[in-house]
Amino acid sequence: MTLKPSPSKAILVIDDQPIARSTLRRQLEYYGFAVLEEATAIAGLRTYHKERARIGLVFLDLDLPDLSGEETFARLRKLDPQAKVALCSEESATQIKGQKGFHGALGVIKKPVRTDRLLAVVRHALG
């Protein structure tokens, strides 16, 4: 699968599970993307605030220890109403889409993440 990375746009991964972060980072870097990683919602929000000009997409785990996925998503959208955010969860997309508070998310990626689904979301977000 070919996907041309955008050298000017990084992807921020916010996930408290080291293995999940590492897996996403390796998959994305394999396809040439710069990746920023954070283990907590607060750290992720701080990084997004500081680096938002270079972040083209956020992968947000919905089960973080410090803030709920819904609260983190809302805060990202408050920082930048145009923020491109894809949700990551062990729940199915159907379960997540039924929840309020995620309007405007680019989609849901079920863990464990399949590379083809990951790249489809990146392609949609970054063109």
Image: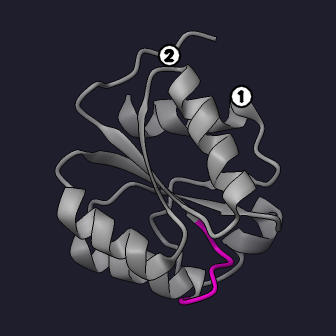
Q: Relative to 50, is 61 on the left or the right?
A: right
Q: Nearer the viewer, residue 38 or 95?
A: 38
Q: Amino acid at mark 1?
A: Asp
Residue drawn at (82%, 63%) of the image = 92
> Mark 2 or 1 closer to N-term?
2
Which sits in the foreground, 87 or 65?
Answer: 65
Reading the image, the residue beneath label 1 is: 116
> Residue drawn 19% across and 64% down?
50
Classify 21 as above or below 105: above
Confirm whether the magenta stretch covers residue 69: no
Mark 2 closeness class: few <14, some 14–19, many ≥20 residues within 10 Å:
few
Quadrant hosting residue 48: bottom left
Residue 120 in view: no
Residue 100 image point, x, y percent: 59, 84
Calculate the distance from the C-alpha at mark 2 to the C-alpha at mark 1.
11 Å
Q: Which structural element holds mark 2?
A: loop
- Looking at the image, residue 79 sits to the left or right of residue 62; the answer is left
What is the span of residues highlighted in magenta in the rendered image? 61-67
Residue 127: x percent and y percent? Answer: 38, 28
- Quadrant occupied by the N terminus: top right
Residue under pointer 2? 3
Residue pushed farthest top? 2
User: Does the magenta stretch mainly form a helix, a strand or a loop?
Assistant: loop
Residue 100 visible (yes or no): yes
Q: How many marks?
A: 2
Q: Amino acid at mark 2?
A: Leu
Residue drawn at point x = 23 percent, y = 75 percent: 79
